[in-house]
Image (cartoon, rainbow, N blue to C red):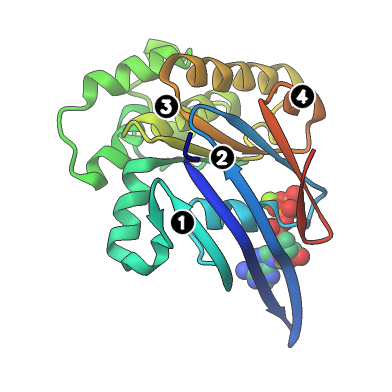
Amino acid sequence: MNPLIKAWGIKRSFFNGGKKIEVLKGVNLEVYEKEIVAIMGVSGSGKSTLLHILGLMDAPDEGELVFLGFKNPFSLGEKKVASLRNREIGFVFQFPSLLPEFSVLENVLMPAFIGGFKNKEKRAMELLRSVGLKESLFNRRSYMLSEGEKQRVVLARALINKPRLVIADEPTASLDEKTAAEIFDLIKDINRVYGQTFIVASHDRTLLSRCDRSYLLHGSRLYEA
Ligand SMILES: Nc1ncnc2c1ncn2[C@@H]1O[C@H](COP(=O)(O)OP(=O)(O)OP(=O)(O)O)[C@@H](O)[C@H]1O
Ligand SMILES: [Mg+2]
């Protein structure tokens, strides 16, 4: 089976006050269709840096990336990369980032709107139901929701365009233990029902033990854990 993502020799450095910090020193990884893959590592180890590259938000300095059959997708140019990102990747971050003045439903529809996909209201409502959001909240402005409710909306939004990959960067870190477990259950359900592949960065070992496979970032290198 061909991997959904294959990366090798990925390097990324940043300059901080004239000093070069090598965050990724040659990272290799493969992610297969329908897997939930965890990326572990202490704070500052480079998890977000790696997820930004795998999510086509940031190009590596060196290395090769094959993404859904596209070799070195960054060479396609910003417009094509943006469209690939919009169609094929859903994002979930640590702090639920919704547009506060828009309704819950409008937030879920936003990636469909940006991608020019029409008539997605029914799907948006189905997704909101499947992530367990109360129907009475669908038309409420998103700033009124609790953090747990917002993260459910973010998950629904991540799925609206039926992406093949969902990248979740510490999706449960801002939630209490019970809500975090519920959100992780949802990720497992979505993976089972819709077949989406997930790459999840987290510190939480209990949640990570429920992933199919895990990697550890340590000393700027990635190890199978
Ligand atoms: N745009 C940037 N400019 C300069 N330095 C950066 C940039 N992005 C990340 N870094 C540095 O790279 C290192 C890795 O950061 P990164 O955010 O990837 O870590 P992380 O593992 O996600 O940490 P956390 O668990 O706290 O989210 C840190 O030292 C950080 O300060
Ligand atoms: Mg991070």
For label 3, the residue is 156
Indicate the quadrant where residue 71 lies.
bottom left
Residue shown at the point (68%, 26%) measured from the top left: 211
**Pointer 1: what residue?**
56
Amino acid under label 1? Leu
Q: Which residue is mark 4?
A: 209
In the picture, which quadrant includes the C terminus?
top right
Secondary structure beneath dot 2 equals strand
- Relative to residue 91, is residue 144 depicted above or below? above
Marks 1/4 in contact by CB < 8 Å: the verdict is: no
Residue 21 image point, x, y percent: 76, 74
Residue 91 to residue 12: above or below: above
> Residue most toward the front?
1
Assess disc 4: are there few (<14), some (14-19) or many (≥20) residues with their C-alpha within 10 Å of its C-alpha.
Answer: few
Q: Is residue 95 left or right of residue 138?
A: right
Q: CA distance from mark 1 to mark 3?
A: 21 Å
Question: What type is the residue that disc 3 sits on?
Answer: Ala
| Percent of width and height locating residue 207 | 73, 24
On the image, numbered disc 2 is attached to which residue?
A: 31
SS label for mark 1: loop
Q: Earlier in the sequence, mark 1 or mark 4?
A: 1
Residue at 51% in and 66% down? 59
Kindly indicate whether the residue at mark 3 contacts the one at mark 4 (C-beta within 8 angstroms).
Answer: no
Secondary element under disc 4, as helix, strand or loop, is loop
Against 83, residue 58 (above or below) is below
Q: Nearer the viewer, mark 1 or mark 3?
A: 1
